[in-house]
Image: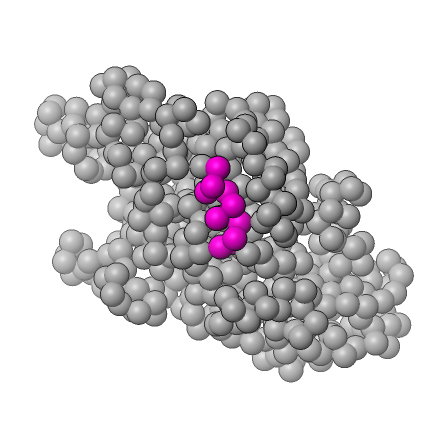
């Protein structure tokens, strides 16, 4: 399977019909639990001496098929699917900093992530430091102290489409024995695979472009299988004995997979944000059209961005396809399949005119999802990033007139015509 091309993997990886009565489409294992063969079988499952399923909160065949397929597409070694993107982020950072410590984080992130960083993690003894030094890996390295447990970034940022140099960030972090976590939600593995650029852990909100139909909430955690960064001195949690493992540690039981294993055993198991089999099945079906969807979304976004850049109603536009894009050199080097479906722009008018513009839209859906087959529009500072205070908005480079578009699969000319009529209705043209 590793030698197959991307588009073959998105159809075939992680599932064998011969294991499921030759069913071409993976079955939905809609079950809470699984019978044990005998008492020894039960003990083996509970102590992880034998692979198998015992309770759907911590494992289900349909959910496994979904995770395995994304694992193949990303070139990861280990993966677990969870109930949401926020669960994926939370379980990852809790796993890395369960003993406390600091996470160096990009300020160019989804608003809900920053809200969690501001409110949730400090309550748990984890310090989150938002730093624009992610734009300069040399400066970032200067901020990596002994207390830092991870560097956290988005590959393509929401909503500004900032593109970071993951290769150089990873080199800087690894000099100090610190893993790099990349939220790859906007890019998907079709556009960018962070593990090929030095990242150690990838998280997804699979709710968005990865599955692409706006019908599930799901998340994933993947890693590169290199456990050498997690030393006993810096990350003792992986080496501590656990009762249900017979006094062994997660590193003892799965030396090549103790990061994902501990996230599953401790956080998925005990906090319980499990992905349902039905949603995993819908995720698998969504993955089958990943390349076609994201390619069309990228092309539509590029065409819309070019129109917006030429419009007198618009102050600025951000999308990797544009010659004016701040990170054009990185985009040309790494985003060879397209710049993604998300772009942002600034309305050249009053707040009242911006509201009138959005309220006059007819084809775009006004809501906060991303990567949908349908085109979406939202005023991010008032919605998806309303949690950010003024200093955080400034640090994240989110002006108050920012409008975000997630291009869908409609005809680009129709979408442009819709924007044009809305600008006129708002008195911007």
The quadrant where residue 347 appears = bottom right
Q: Residue at x 88, y 72 (%)?
A: 427
- Residue 91 visible in the snapshot: no
Does the magenta segment cover residue 223? Answer: no
Picture coordinates of residue 312 (x, y %)?
83, 76
In the image: residue 363, left or right of residue 74: right
Q: Residue at x 64, y 36 (%)?
A: 129
- Residue 426 visible in the snapshot: yes
The quadrant where residue 31 appears = top left
The quadrant where residue 5 appears = bottom left
Does the magenta segment cover residue 170? Answer: yes
Picture coordinates of residue 204 (x, y %)?
47, 50
Picture coordinates of residue 295 (x, y %)?
49, 73
Magenta residue span: 166-176
Picture coordinates of residue 93 (x, y %)?
49, 35
> Dividing the image into 4 quarters, which one contains the C terminus?
bottom right
In the image: residue 368, left or right of residue 93: right
């Amino acid at each position: 399977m590793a030698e197959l091309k991307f588009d073959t993997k998105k159809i075939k990886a992680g599932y064998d019909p011969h294991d499921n009565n030759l069913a071409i489409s993976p079955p939905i294992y809609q079950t809470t639990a699984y019978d044990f063969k005998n008492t020894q079988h039960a003990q083996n499952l509970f102590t992880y001496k034998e692979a198998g399923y015992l309770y759907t909160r911590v494992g289900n065949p349909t959910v496994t098929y979904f995770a395995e397929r994304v694992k193949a597409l990303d070139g990861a070694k280990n993966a677990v699917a969870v109930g949401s993107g926020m669960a994926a982020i939370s379980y990852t950072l809790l796993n890395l900093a369960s003993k406390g410590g600091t996470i160096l984080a990009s300020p160019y992130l989804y608003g809900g992530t920053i809200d969690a960083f501001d409110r949730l993690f400090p309550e748990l003894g984890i310090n989150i430091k938002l730093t624009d030094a992610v734009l300069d890996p040399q400066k970032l390295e200067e901020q990596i102290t002994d207390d830092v447990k991870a560097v956290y970034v988005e590959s393509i940022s929401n909503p500004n489409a900032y593109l970071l140099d993951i290769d150089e960030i990873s080199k800087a972090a690894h000099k100090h024995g610190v893993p790099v976590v990349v939220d790859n939600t906007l890019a998907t593995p079709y556009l960018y695979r962070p593990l090929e650029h030095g990242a150690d852990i990838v998280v997804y909100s699979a709710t968005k472009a990865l599955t692409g139909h706006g019908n599930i909430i799901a998340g994933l955690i993947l890693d590169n299988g290199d456990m050498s960064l997690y030393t006993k001195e810096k990350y003792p949690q992986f080496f501590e004995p656990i009762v249900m493992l017979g006094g062994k540690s997660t590193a003892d039981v799965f030396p090549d997979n103790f990061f994902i294993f501990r996230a599953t055993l401790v956080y998925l198991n005990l906090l319980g944000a499990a992905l349902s089999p039905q949603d995993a099945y819908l995720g698998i079906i969504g993955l089958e059209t990943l390349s076609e969807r994201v390619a069309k979304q990228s092309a539509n976004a590029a065409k819309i961005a070019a129109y917006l850049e030429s419009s007198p109603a618009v102050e600025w536009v951000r999308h990797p396809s544009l010659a004016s894009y701040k990170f054009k050199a990185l985009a040309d080097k790494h985003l060879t399949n397209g710049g993604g479906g998300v772009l942002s722009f600034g309305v050249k008018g009053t707040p009242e005119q911006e509201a009138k513009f959005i309220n006059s839209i007819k084809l775009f859906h006004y809501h906060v999802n991303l990567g949908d087959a349908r085109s979406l529009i939202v005023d991010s500072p008032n919605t998806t990033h309303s949690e950010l205070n003024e200093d955080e908005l400034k640090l994240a480079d989110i002006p108050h007139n920012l409008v975000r578009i997630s291009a869908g699969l409609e005809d680009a000319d129709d979408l442009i015509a819709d924007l044009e009529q809305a600008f006129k209705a708002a008195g911007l043209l």
